[in-house]
Image (cartoon, helix red, strand yellow):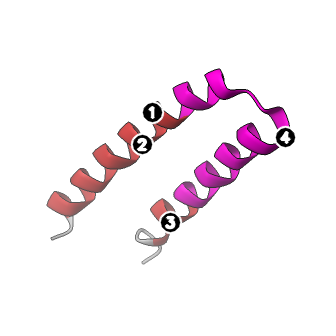
C-alpha cells in the first residue's frame, strides 16, 4: 500500500539535495551532474511505474 508514496519521498529528498547543492554548497558543476543523472533516474522510474502499475 505504501508503494505509491515511496517515489514521492525519494523525489522530495532529491529536491532537498538539489537545493542544498545550489544554496549552501554553491557547487554548480556538481549540481549539473547530479541533476542530469537524477532526472534520468526519475524518468526511468516513472516509465517503469507507468507500465507496471497501469
Residue 53 placement (x, y as % from top left): 21, 67
Report whether 25 appears left or right of 18. right
In terms of secondary structure, where does tag 3 sit?
helix
Q: Earlier in the sequence, mark 3 or mark 4?
A: 3
Residue 42 placement (x, y as % from top left): 39, 48
Residue that protrudes farthest toward the bottom in the picture = 1
The residue singled out by tag 4 in the image is: 24
The structure residue drawn at horizontal position 30% and vertical position 55%, both measured from the top left corner, is: 46
Q: Which mark is residue 39?
A: 2
Bounds of the magenta span? Answer: 10-34
Cα–Cα gap, marks 1 and 2: 5 Å
Task: Write down the quadrant of residue 28 in the picture.
Answer: top right
Q: Does the stretch in magenta take in 50?
A: no
Cα–Cα gap, marks 4 and 1: 19 Å
The structure residue drawn at horizontal position 49% and vertical position 71%, both measured from the top left corner, is: 5
Q: Which mark is residue 36?
A: 1
Report whether 44 appears left or right of 24. left
Q: Earlier in the sequence, mark 1 or mark 3?
A: 3
In terms of secondary structure, where does tag 1 sit?
helix
Residue that protrudes farthest toward the top in the picture = 29
Q: Nearer the viewer, residue 3 or 38?
A: 38
Q: Nearer the viewer, mark 1 or mark 3?
A: 1
Height in image: 54 above or below 45?
A: below
Q: Earlier in the sequence, mark 2 or mark 3?
A: 3
In terms of secondary structure, where does tag 2 sit?
helix
Task: Write down the quadrant of residue 4 in the picture.
Answer: bottom left
Amino acid at each position: 500500500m505504501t508503494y505509491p508514496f515511496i517515489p514521492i519521498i525519494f523525489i522530495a529528498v532529491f529536491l532537498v539535495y538539489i537545493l542544498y547543492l545550489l544554496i549552501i554548497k554553491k557547487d554548480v558543476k556538481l549540481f549539473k551532474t547530479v541533476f542530469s543523472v537524477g532526472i534520468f533516474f526519475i524518468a526511468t522510474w516513472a516509465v517503469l511505474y507507468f507500465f507496471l502499475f497501469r
